[in-house]
Image (cartoon, rainbow, N blue to C red):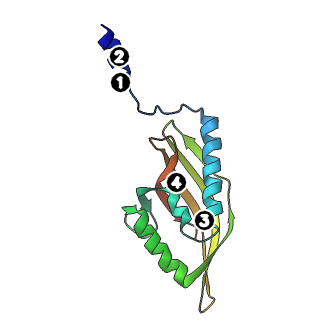
């Protein structure tokens, strides 16, 4: 009988249980993540890519829906940063749709791409939709992004 009691703690379930948050708590938590994301994005280096899962889905105008990796995203933006200066002029406060393990956020943005040689500018304004997924360690990462450009 003593063996059974000694053995039971070894069988204990050590998996992390998800933290249960109210909708308001989740909105505040993801608001902080969105603010952090944009703070890092405005530095125009590659650290903002760390907010994404290793593989995620993205949907951009005139491209197919695709699964993409953080590495391929970094390569794409390396090319853009080599040719353009990017300036985020403004962004709107996000709104949210919450559930316990996923939160959808969306907000407007207005940025410009300035060609480094010609100094020509390309305006880029629209709506950014992000799906944040709770990770096994209870952190949050982007699993889906979509950009909807305004004409």
Asked whether the beta carbons under mark 2 and mark 1 sit within 8 Å of each other, the answer is yes
Asked whether the beta carbons under mark 3 and mark 2 sit within 8 Å of each other, the answer is no
For marks 2 and 1, give the one nearer the viewer.
2
Separation of marks 2 and 1 at Cα, in angstroms = 8 Å
For marks 2 and 4, give the one nearer the viewer.
2
Q: Residue furthest top?
A: 1
Q: Quadrant of the N terminus?
A: top left
Question: In x, y percent, where is residue 27?
Answer: 62, 42
Question: In x, y percent, where is residue 102?
Answer: 49, 42
Q: Is residue 10 above or below residue 40?
A: above
Q: Which residue is mark 4?
A: 130
Which quadrant of the figure has residue 2?
top left
Q: Which residue is mark 2?
A: 6
Q: Residue at x 51, y 78 (%)?
A: 80
Q: Which residue is mark 3?
A: 41
Q: Residue at x 44, y 74 (%)?
A: 75
Q: Is residue 148 above or below residue 95?
A: below
Q: Is residue 25 visible?
A: yes
For marks 1 and 3, give the one nearer the viewer.
1
N-term mark: 3 or 2: 2
Binning the other alpha carbons within 10 Å of mark 1 as few (below 14), some (14 to 19) or many (20 upward) gives few
């Amino acid at each position: 009988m003593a063996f059974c009691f000694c053995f039971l703690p070894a069988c204990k379930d050590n998996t992390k249980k998800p933290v249960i948050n109210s909708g308001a708590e989740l909105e505040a938590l993801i608001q902080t993540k969105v603010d952090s994301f944009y703070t890092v994005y405005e530095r125009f280096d590659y650290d903002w890519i760390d907010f994404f899962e290793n593989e995620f889905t993205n949907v951009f105008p005139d491209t197919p829906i695709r699964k993409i990796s953080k590495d391929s995203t970094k390569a794409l933006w390396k090319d853009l940063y080599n040719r353009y200066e990017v300036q985020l002029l403004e962004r709107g406060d996000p709104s949210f749709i919450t559930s316990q393990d996923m939160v959808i956020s969306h907000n407007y943005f207005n940025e410009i791409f300035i060609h480094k040689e010609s100094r020509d500018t390309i305006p880029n304004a629209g709506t950014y939709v992000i799906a944040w997924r709770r990770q096994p360690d209870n952190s949050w990462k982007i699993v889906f992004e979509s950009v909807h450009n305004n004409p």
